[in-house]
Amino acid sequence: MCLRDYTDEPLVGERRWGFFIFNLVLLCLGAALMAMRVSAGGWTVGSVVLLSLFVVLLAPVVYGFTLAVTGWWLLRQGGDPLRINHTLPPEVPTDPLPPTAIVMPICNEDVNRIFQGLRVMYQSLSATGQGNAFDFFILSDSTDLNLWIAEEKAWFELCQQVGGFGRIFYRKRRRPLHHKSGNIADFCRRWGTTYRYAIVLDADSVMTGATCVRLASLMEANPRAGIIQTNPKLALGRSLFQRINQFAAQVYGPLFAAGANFWQLDNANYYGHNAIVRLKPFITYCALPELPKSGALGTRVLSHDTVEAAFMRRAGYEVWSAYDLAGSYEEAPPHLLASLQRDRRWCHGNLQHLWFLFAPGLTTPSRLNILIGLLAYLSSPLWVLFLVLSPLLFTTGMATARGGLLFAYVMSLLLAPKLLGAQRLLSATPPLKIIRRRLTILRDVSRRLTILRDVIAETIYSVILAPILMLFYTQFVWASFFGGEAAWGRQKRTDDLGPSWSDLAAAHLGHTVLAVTTGALVAWLAPAMLPWLLLVLLGPLVAMPFSRLLASNLLASASRHAGWFMVPEETCPPWELQQVLKPFASSASRFPPLLELTEDFGLLQAVLDPGLNAIHVTLLHERSHVPVRTREYLADLANRLLRDGPQALTPLEKRTLLWDTQAVLSAHRQLWRSPVPHVHGWWQAAFRIYNGNTQLTTKP
């Protein structure tokens, strides 16, 4: 059946009704078991509250179970026939594709990683024969002046290396308004009418050229598609935290993605990266409104992607998940604290979606996507409340009826996705076909035991991690409503050393003390409850050493050597991932990384080096009219910079100087024309090094 005809089929309604009726049946069964337990001592206000909380909390668990079972069943059948990737044959198209932009918003990122990834993608696209249809845009909001100049230098060198002038563009925004969504909006205003599609990336995204071509081809084949979201795989993990998450995503992720597509269909979600958008309707219908300023969840939407998908669907365009499309990758945060930093922002952004839950015109699946995103964080404080009230089960006689059956039911729902993922992995690779049959059996048994070992280890990891996340998410929800703004900040993507013990204590010690206190009180007041509560208390009790071990690159290397948590991207990585790990081939710098030059290294290069000065002023937008007083102020900044050194200027003054074409050119010319004694010693030292032509590479 063609996707363009599927909306006329009653099958879609049957799918969604069947999916959610199955959810409802499982939810009612759990509610009945809980009702028998809490009503053992008679119905009270406390028992009703406990039952109500349990039903709300069980709903996401049931939903996850249903997704996994549905996805497992579909994948066993060879895939869902109603999927966007099924609308085209697997062959690479030979017809020219329409103009497509590949946009990467960045903010204070690792320059080497960014531009190496872009070079790999550019070369991978060129190898497909369709590279001329794609242009690259690096959209910088970096506030670090050193990184700003390093980005400009890397852009120029990338264009030189791959012949990308006129195909690879760099733009630095003067005012980074509204973070990533504002950066994308700025691109749409300036270049949106030039391109039919845009592939949106994150700073850690990698996509193969074949995948980019496939996405554009799918858009061409499905003119009502407004957004097609890939299901990016986690890759390039160096810490134990990253490697375990990679393994979990590899084993369980396909089940959930296939199950979600079963009921979402053209109402899929959008992650904001590793996806392609149709620019004309995106510009017309997906502009984000300003939220009411009253309350903690006002002003600007942080998590823009879900809202943009809902708006695109409201406009009549489809949003699809190409969950079975390979060649799309991203990286996980290096450790738990870095992941929590990101989750803090995601939590605040998802809670802002409360403003849109009942917005007019949204489709029911779009509202459900918003609700699911809300419950991902709101369920944590509800779990805390449930645990606070749960002693009622042990002090009022409620624990006497069918407690074991309820526990077994809930654990079955939680563990079933892991078992189904393991079963799929076990059946994915047939035994080795070699002559010696006994060796074949031994290798097959060893492989199966390895998979089971890894799944069990990941399950233990999840049991420890879940209550840690519950406490943090509860804090995040509280802070979003009552505790102030969620900072955007620089996202930590690599950390070879990991968090210090002081960082871990600051993050986890309060939760550990809370767990010890809670355990002592429960042992005193309701000792029968303690064995059940240990599953929740274990995570906070061991949070500090647990978080420290997860951040270890050494343990990750040892686990990889021992064959733990292996994924195909490690055992047989695609060419693109192999190349991304290599350093960006930047030209040697004339400046060594001397301590006294490091703080203002970007300013030094932009003013002193003729080549970088030319690159910098070329990328600036020269203002047609500058008031006389402003010009005098800029000239004074340049004079002070040369006479008194960079330390004489504030960060704002340095930024102001670097943003003006004439000021940077004037400072450059004045510096080269001035006698050595007339400039500050800082510049004299820089000149000595520059003229000495020391061939050392400086990494920004």
Image: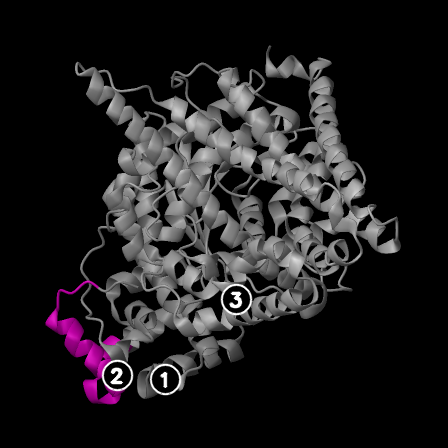
Horizontal side, residue 559 vs residue 4: left or right: left
Q: Amino acid at mark 1?
A: Gln
Residue 616 in magenta?
A: no
Question: Could you classify mark 1 by the number of other residues whose Cα lies within 10 Å: few (under 14), some (14-19), or many (20 or more)?
Answer: few
Q: Which mark is residue 647?
A: 1
Mark 1 touching mark 2, by CB under 8 A?
yes
Residue 124 or 274: which is nearer the viewer? Answer: 274
Q: Amino acid at mark 3?
A: His
| Gap in angstroms between the C-alphas marked 1 and 2 | 9 Å
Viewer-nearest of discs 2 and 3: 2
Q: Secondary structure at mark 1?
A: helix
Can you say whether 690 is above or below 227 in the image? below
Horizontal side, residue 608 vs residue 391: left or right: left
Residue interval drawn in magenta: 671-697
Residue 551 or 524: which is nearer the viewer? Answer: 524
| Gap in angstroms between the C-alphas marked 2 and 3 | 33 Å
Quadrant position of residue 344: bottom right
Q: Main secondary structure of the magenta part?
A: helix
Residue 279: where, in percent of width, then height?
57, 36
